[in-house]
């Protein structure tokens, strides 16, 4: 529990610093308010997913989208700011191109992928332990 609190505290502090520094430059009150709303949206999203009966595939897509968003923000906003790199149109184009290549690669892998269908021709479900 202590590790979780330390992780969340450091994450919220990093969010506050990001909101109050360039290029966002929010006031401290607005930064704290926005940080609170973002945190509250995570709680609401967790409650909705927990209370709804969604498939593992849908849950995987939700998690992939969330992780992808964090990776994108880290690679395109936070890392260049930390390194003092100014954003340019060419750099933005490279980031978008890398995203498209990754999305197409994942799509091609998943296209017509039936490995994890429930059961086989004998009625055995070799992936029952995964669920």
Image: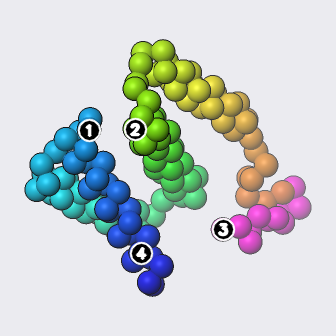
Marked residue nearer the N-terminal end (4 or 1):
4
Front tag of 4 and 1: 1
Per the image, label 4 sits on a secondary structure element best described as helix
Q: CA distance from mark 4 to mark 1?
A: 25 Å
Give the percent coordinates (x, y) of residue 60: 56, 53
Residues tagged 4 and 2 counted as in contact (Cβ below 8 A): no
Residue closest to the eye, 52 or 15: 15
Give the CA separation, mark 4 to mark 3. 31 Å
Residue hosting label 3 = 131
How far is disc 1 from disc 3 in space, using C-alphas? 45 Å
Location of mark 2 (residue): 81
Tag 1 residue: 22
Front position among marks 3 and 2: 2
The answer to whether residue 82 shows anywhere in this view is yes
Judged from this view, the residue extending furthest toward the bottom is: 1
**The stretch drawn in magenta includes residue 45:** no
State yes or no: discs 4 and 1 in contact (Cβ < 8 Å): no
Residue highlighted by disc 4: 6
Q: Residues within 10 Å of mark 2 (few under 14, many from 20)?
A: some
Q: Is residue 95 above or below residue 3?
A: above
Of 20 and 39, the residue lying toward us: 20
Q: Secondary structure at mark 3?
A: loop
Look at the image and give the residue range highlighted in magenta: 121-131
Specify few, some or many for label 1: CA neighbours under 10 Å numbering under 14, 14-19, or 20 or more: few
Q: Which mark is residue 94?
A: none
Residue 130 colored in magenta in the image: yes
Mark 3 vs mark 2: which is more N-terminal? 2
Dot 1 falls on a residue whose secondary structure is loop
């Amino acid at each position: 529990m202590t590790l979780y609190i330390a992780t969340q505290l450091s994450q919220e502090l990093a969010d506050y610093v990001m909101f109050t520094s360039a290029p966002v430059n929010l006031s401290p009150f607005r930064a704290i308010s926005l940080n609170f709303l973002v945190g509250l949206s995570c709680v609401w999203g967790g409650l909705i997913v927990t209370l709804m009966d969604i498939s593992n595939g849908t849950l995987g897509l939700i998690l992939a989208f969330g992780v992808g968003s964090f990776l994108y923000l880290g690679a395109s906003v936070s890392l260049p700011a930390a390194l003092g790199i100014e954003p340019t149109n060419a750099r933005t184009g490279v980031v978008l191109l890398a995203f498209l290549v990754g999305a197409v690669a994942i799509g091609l892998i998943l296209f017509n992928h039936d490995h994890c269908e429930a059961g086989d021709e004998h009625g055995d479900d070799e992936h029952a332990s995964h669920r």
